[in-house]
Image (spheres, rainbow, N blue to C red):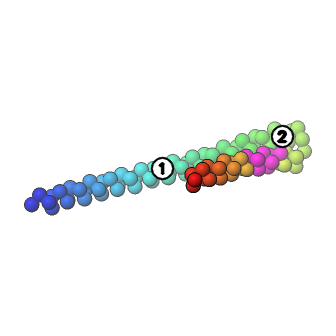
Amino acid sequence: MIGPLLKIATTAAAARGLRDAAIDARNRALLALAAGAGGAVALFCFSRAALTLLENRMDPAEAWTLLGGFYGVLGGAFYFAASKRRARRTI
C-alpha cells in the first residue's frame, strides 16, 4: 500500500529536480549568450576607438596592421592558455 505512494512521491520529486535543472541550464545559456554579445559589441567599440586614435597619428593601413597584430598576439596567447589547460586536465 505504501510502496505505490512512495513511487509517486519520488517520481514527482525527480520530475521537479529535472525541471529545475533544465531551467538552470537555460538561464546559464542565455547569460552566456548575453555575455558573448556584450563582449562582441565592446570589442567592436574599442577597436573603432583605437583605430580612430591610431589613424590620427599614422597611416590607416599601419593602424589596421597594428590592431590586427595586437589581436593576433592576443588570440595566440588565449590559444596557448587553453591548450595548456587542456593538456593539464588530460594528465
- Magenta-drawn stretch contains 71: yes
Q: Is residue 23 visible?
A: yes
Q: Nearer the viewer, residue 74 or 68?
A: 74
Instruction: Give the total of numbered labels.
Output: 2
Residue 41, how many percent across, how many down?
65, 46
Mark 1: amino acid: Arg
Q: Main secondary structure of the magenta part?
A: helix
Label 2 element class: helix
Residue visible at 34% across and 56% down?
18
Q: Is residue 36 left or right of residue 4?
A: right
Residue visible at 76% across and 50% down?
72
Residue visible at 80% across and 43% down?
51
Q: Is residue 82 visible?
A: no
Q: Classify 49 as above or below 17.
A: above
Residue at the disc numbered 2: 54
Label 1 element class: helix
Residue 6, how many percent across, how many down?
17, 57
Residues packed near mark 2 inside 10 Å, few (<14), some (14 to 19) or many (20 plus): some
Write down the region rendered in magenta.
Answer: 66-74
Q: Nearer the viewer, residue 85 or 12?
A: 85
Identify the image quadrant of the N terminus: bottom left
Q: Nearer the viewer, residue 8 or 56?
A: 8
Residue 21, how many percent across, how many down?
38, 53
Contact, mark 2 vs mark 1 (Cβ under 8 Å)? no
Taking the view exactly as shown, the residue that stands out farthest to the front is 91
Residue 24, how many percent across, how many down?
42, 50
Residue at the disc numbered 1: 28
